[in-house]
Image (spheres, rainbow, N blue to C red):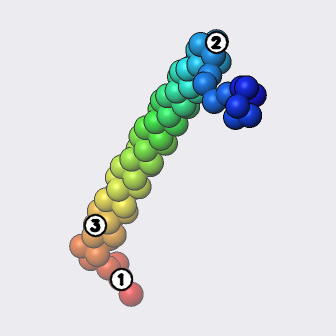
Amino acid sequence: MSENGEANTSTSPTATNSADDARQELSVQLEDLLNTLSNKFAGVSSEIFAKMDEMSRRLDNLESQIMAGKEKPNGPA
C-alpha cells in the first residue's frame, strides 16, 4: 500500500510481459486446436461424401437390376 492507504494498482513490466506471454501462448494453442478440429472435420466430411457416392452407385445398380428384371418376359407358368 502507498502512504495514503490506497493499494498500488500499477503493474510491473515483468507482470505485464508475463501476462502478454500467457495470452500469446493461449492464442497459439487455440489456433492449433482450431486447425486440428478443422482438419478432422474435413476428413470426416470427405468420408461421408465418399460413403454417399458409394450408396448412390449401389442404388443405381439395384435400380438397373430391378428394371432389367421387369423387362424380361416371364417364363412358362
Asked whether the viewer can see residue 13, the reply is yes
Whole-angstrom CA distance, mark 3 to mark 2, is 81 Å
For the N terminus, the quadrant is top right
Q: Position of residue 17 (x, y in %)?
A: 58, 14
Front residue of 25/3: it is 3
Q: Report the front residue among 6 and 19.
A: 6
The residue positioned 24% from the left and 73% from the top of the image is 71
Corner quadrant of residue 23: top right
Tell me where residue 47 appears, x and y as whole percent: 46, 42
- Label 3 vs 2, first from the N-terminus: 2
Q: Position of residue 19 (x, y in %)?
A: 61, 22
Closer to us: 21 or 74: 21
- Report the mark closest to the observer, 3 or 2: 2
Query: Which residue is the site of mark 1?
Result: 76
Label 3 or label 1, whichever lies nearer to me, is 3
Image point (45%, 48%), residue name:
48
- Rounded to the nearest angstrom, the CA distance separating label 1 from label 2 is 97 Å
**Separation of residues labelled 3 and 1 (CA atoms):** 18 Å
- CB within 8 Å, label 3 to label 1: no
Q: Is 20 left, or right, of 75 in this rendering?
A: right
Residue 62 sits in quarter = bottom left
Which sits earlier in the primary sequence, circle 3 or circle 1? 3
Residue placed furthest toward the front: 4
Q: Amino acid at mark 1?
A: Pro
- Residue at the location (39% across, 47% down)? 49
Q: Mark 2 = which residue?
A: 14
Q: Characterize the local packing of mark 1: few (<14), some (14-19) or many (20 or more) Cα atoms within 10 angstroms.
A: few
Q: Residue 1, relative to residue 52: is it above or below?
A: above
